[in-house]
Structure formats: structure tokens, C-alpha cells
Image (cartoon, coloured by chain):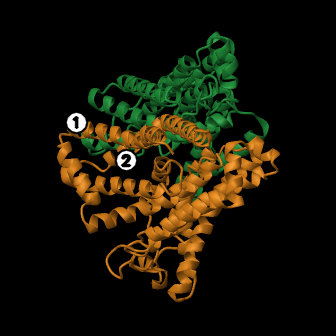
Amino acid sequence: MTTAGAGLRSRSRYAAYLVPLGAVGTALLIGALMLVLLDANPIEGFGAMLSGAFGGADALTSTALKATPLLFVGVGITIAFRANVINIGGEGQMVAGGLLATAVALVLPDWPAAVMLPTVLVAGMVGGAIWGAVPGALKAYYGVNEILSTIMLNVVAVQLMNFLLRGPMIDPGEIERGTRIPQTQRLQEGADLPLLFGSGRLHIGPVIAALVAVAAYILLWRTPVGFRVRAVGQSTDAARYAGIPVKRTIVLALTLAGAMGGLAGAVLVFGSESHRMVTDGSTAGFTGNAGFNGIVAALFGGLHPLWAIPASFLFGGLLVGGNALQRAVQVPTALILALNGLVVVFVVASDRYRRTLGERASQAETAAKLAAQAAAEAPP
Amino acid sequence: MSELLTKAVLVATIAGGIRLAVPLLLASLGETFGQRSGVLNLGVDGIMLLGAFGGYYAVLESGDVWLGLAAGIVIGMLLGVVSALISVTLLAEQGISGIGVYLFGLGLSDLLFQRLVGTPTPIPKFPKLDIPGLSDIPVIGETLFQFSLIVYVAVALVPISIFVINRTTFGMKVRSVGENPEAADSLGVSITRVRWITVTIGGTLAGVAGAALAIDLGIFQQNLTNAQGFIAIALVYFGAWRPLGVMTGALLYGLVNSLVLQFKTLGIIPQSWSDIAAMAPALITILALVVVARRFRQPAALTKPFTRGT
């Protein structure tokens, strides 16, 4: 390839990569403004944010743990998005997965970890998959808008969680003591996520999430199933003419997305420090809004499973840093939620521009490649 | 005695249902305009929350409920304009950008409440507006004609919306932009302008809905709306994008909720099952979506950003 071609690539391509970064930067700038209005020093705040997220092993551990559910959900949303299905149900799928995995862990005898752990993680995937398959089937066979059905199922999931954790699944000790905190008993140790370095807080969750991202990449671009998913996403009509079962593919895409969310929920339960499932009455209390924030991670990663890995890590850092910021300059955590919203808005609003730049880059690269080829083939 | 009790309960349930329906009705009617023009605004709940806080805070400071309502209007209009900028001009994916607005509203309303108010302080509610003659009719008067002004305004907006959408040039433009933007564009209709207006109407009414909710309850708290904004969006689907259908849906929803509340107070639903009962609205909504999706077609251009020549 000629130097001119390489030059073209670097400019438009990197500009396309910079757009989402600029979007996040703008959101943070508004955040700084809000800090000023709240009588807090934004430089001090953002300094605390940065060191809280990435400064040292402990901070990085927190960031990796926070990034894990984002990555799971983000990968799932990427798969759904590739089939042109929008999954806003990450919250409910995480809850459903966490609930089924917890229920299985409560029911099963004390199996060794080698059997127990895979069983409960699969149970989590199944729970989430059910919460994805339902809106998938409703969309494919009844034409129900999946955005609305997944949002409604989020509401159903949180009520189910509150019912189960306040009633059938509550720790018997809570009833004996009369405290009635809505949480399960400490789940069996065989289901604990092993620690990555044998001690500390970092468990294997982030590694599983990264492996899942790689698997999703292989699924989408190296298997017939992935081809069908992407074909349906490009054009349902063309896919139908090509003999692809469009309806089943839509159900499958949302089921897979749900399974990812379910896995995120299971990892939250078995990787938690209390090793219980707890509810504070809200979805966010369990998920930490990862079902929504995973959408940003997916978009920020350009809807590519592998790019979702660094994107999730960055967003995990933003969330962990947000807590540090809150402690450092004493602002309510609600600020972080509002900032998250702004990040979503800016990333989505600039997404069209990023894609235009990306397309321009692809065209320029193809042109450069063709020109180089012609130059090589032409007689001197 | 028991007959009197049942009558009182019945009147309270129906009147309560109508009151619960009002914020939903306001927000849904606004969203109907946006959706008829092809824009799905998922940020309704966030706008409602900010409108609710704005309305609450204005009443808390001034003691004037109408100033509170005005605050809701202004905040809603502002956020409507921002939503239009995001989805119409910047062509953002509508299924997601609204979630951002929702999270922003959820966070900011809580932040402002904690900073400016702190402890939940009750505010004066809307005064009851007795309609001479009608309010004095036994049973019917108590059930239908002893509401505050905002209830009548919300109901009056239904025929107004029907008229605007079906009988005015603007309404015709809205419908054409939502069904076939390319054709509308070729006839010289500005897609951008029509959608900016409809999304701003939607935002304004969402802000009003939030303020009406807060002032009706006389209180604000974190996540006051409890996802009512999303229900309002679903009601637009339920009503098949028609104001009358939307109103039917909102009333049905309000009545079901009022009934569940009444059952809980009367002890018909045991406390341990209240979480399960709370699922009912969402499940009913999903069922309604299935029924409607089979019978009605959504505006053809819904959720599709418009760019010329694609």
C-alpha cells in the first residue's frame, strides 16, 4: 500500500475513533460545570476520579470488577444490535439470571466447585435467556416493539426479585431474627467465583467476560449463525430472499443478548463480597444500572465485541471514579447518574457522525488500495 | 351502612383512577404527536421527573400551585427542544438516546432535590374545582366533577389533539411526515421543522405531566414517577396512535391501579403478594401491546431518522 493510502487511512479512521471520545469529553465538561455550580472544585473532583479509577492495583481491581457486567451486557447488546434489535432489557435480564442462578445454588447439594460453578453460571444464562427470548418471540411473531416489551419486563423482573427475596428465597435466619432483610442466605462456597490471584478481591469474572467477548466475535464473523444475524440486521428482506429464517434469527439474537445479561447477573451474585443475592427494592440496587450502561459500552465500542472490552473498562473506570469523586468533593451520587445519562446522549448523538467518518475512511481505503493495485499492475 | 360503604369505596376508586390517569394522559398525548410524526421519544420519564421536581420546587418556594405548573411547562419545553435536537437534527438512534435523557432526568432531579430541599416537605396541592350544578349531583358529581382544574384540562386536550391531528394543515403535515417523509419532503414540507414542533409538544406535555403528578401528590422523592413515563409511551401504542385510544388506555390503567390500591387497603390482597400485584400493570401493558400490534400498524417512519437522498 502506498504512503498516500496509509495517510488517508490514519486521518479518517482515527477521526472516527476520536468522535466517541470527544462525546465523553463533552459530557465530562458539562459535569465540571455542574460541579462548579455545586460549589465543588472540578479539578480536585476529576483528579480524585482519575486516581480512584486507574491509580494503583486496588483502583484497577475495582474498575475491572465494575466493567465486568458492562462487558457482558455490552456484548449481548452488540449481538442484538447486529440483528437490528434494540435490547433495553439488560436490567431485567441481569435480575432474571441472578435469580435463577441463585435459586439453583440454593436447591443443589454441596457439589464441588468444578461442577457447581459451571452449573450456576449456566443457570444464570438460562434465566437471562428466557427474559430475552420472550420479547424476541413477541417481536418476531406478534410484531411487538422490543424496546417497550423489554422495558416492561425490567419492571416485572424487579417485582419478581422483591417477591422472591422477601418471601420464598429469604435467608431463614432473617425470619428467625425478625430482621427480614430481603436477602438470601450465604450461598454455598462451591459457587463462589475463584479469586484470580488466590487472594484479594479480583475474581475470574472479568476473564470470563473477556472470553465471552472473543466468543461473540467468533460467533458473529466466523459462523453461519453469525452470518444470519448480521444478514437480518442489514436487510430483513434480502435475508428472507436468501432463505434465512428471519423470525427465528431475531428470537435467537435477543435470547443470546438475554443470556449475556443473565451471566452478568450470576457473576454479580457469586462474585459479590457477601456471596448472597440482596435487593434494596430497586433494579439499580442489584445491577448498578449496568443494563443501561452496557448500552453505552457497546456503542462506545462501535458495536464490535472486541472493542467492547476496552470500552467497558473505560466506563467501569468512569463509574468507579464517580464514587471517588463523590467522596472527594461531597456531591450526591445522583450526579454520576445524571452524567451517565449525558454520556449516553452524547455518544448516541455523535454516533451518526462517527459512522459517516468510518464509511468515508472505508471508501478512501478501497480507492487507495485499487490505485496501488493499478499502479503495480500497470507496465512501467 | 354496608351499602353506603360500598358506594363510598366505588366513588373513591373511580375518582382515584381518573386522578392517577391524568399524568399518564398528558404525557401520552404529547408522545402521540411525536410518534405520529415518526419520532419515538423514550426520554419521557426523565422529562417527567425534572418537570415534577421543577413544579414541586416552585410550589415549595412560592406556595402557588399554578407557578409550579408553569415551571413544569418551561422545563418540559426546554427538554423537548433538547430531545428534538438529539433525535431530529443529530439523527440519533431513538431507541437509545431517550434512555440517556431518562438517566439524566433521574439523576439530576434527585441531585437537585438533595441539594435544594433535602428532607421531603409537603407542598399545597391543587385546589378542588367545583363545577356549579354538576358537582352537586349525587354519586356522579362526587365521582366526576370534583377534580382540580388540571384534570379537566387533560381531558379537554383529547378533543383538541384529535382536531389538530385530523383537521388542521399542521396535523396533516405531521401524519404525512410520519408515514412517508420522502413524499412529504418532495412536496416541500420541512420534516425537520414538523418533528421539532411535535417533539417539543411532547416534551412540554411530559413536563406538565410531571408537575401535575408532584403537585397532585403534594410531595417529591427520588424516582417519583416510578417508570410512568415508559408506561405513557406504551399507552401510545395501546391507543394505536389515536388520542381517544390513548385516553381509554390511560383511564383503564388508572382504574386498574386504583383498584389494586383499594384491594390492598381493604386487605383483599395480602401484603406478601403486593410485589406480585405490582407486576400487573407491566404484564397488562405487554398483553395490550400484543393485541394492538396484531390489529394496528404503527406510523411507517416511526424511529427512522430522516436524511434526504437515502
User: Which quadrant of the figure contains the C terminus of chain A?
Assistant: top right
Chain name for mark 2: A
- The residue that appears at 52% across and 89% down in the rendered structure is A112
Rendered orange, the chain in question is A
Q: Nearer the viewer, residue A8 or B87?
A: A8
Residue A188: give x, y in percent of width and height: 47, 83
Q: Would residue A55 be visible to someone looking at this image?
A: yes
The residue pinned by badge 1 equals A37
**Kind of residue sitting beneath label 1:** Leu
Q: Earlier in the sequence, mark 2 or mark 1?
A: 1
- Secondary structure under tag 1 reads helix
Mark 1 nearby-residue class (10 Å; few <14, some 14–19, many ≥20): few
The residue pinned by badge 2 equals A337
Q: Colour of chain B?
A: green
Chain name for mark 1: A
Mark 2 nearby-residue class (10 Å; few <14, some 14–19, many ≥20): many
Q: Nearer the viewer, residue B169 or B162?
A: B169
Q: Is residue B181 above or below residue B10?
A: above
Find residue A289 and report its image quarter: bottom left
Q: Nearer the viewer, residue B97 or B169?
A: B97
- Secondary structure under tag 2 reads helix
- Looking at the image, residue B244 sits to the left or right of residue A13; the answer is right
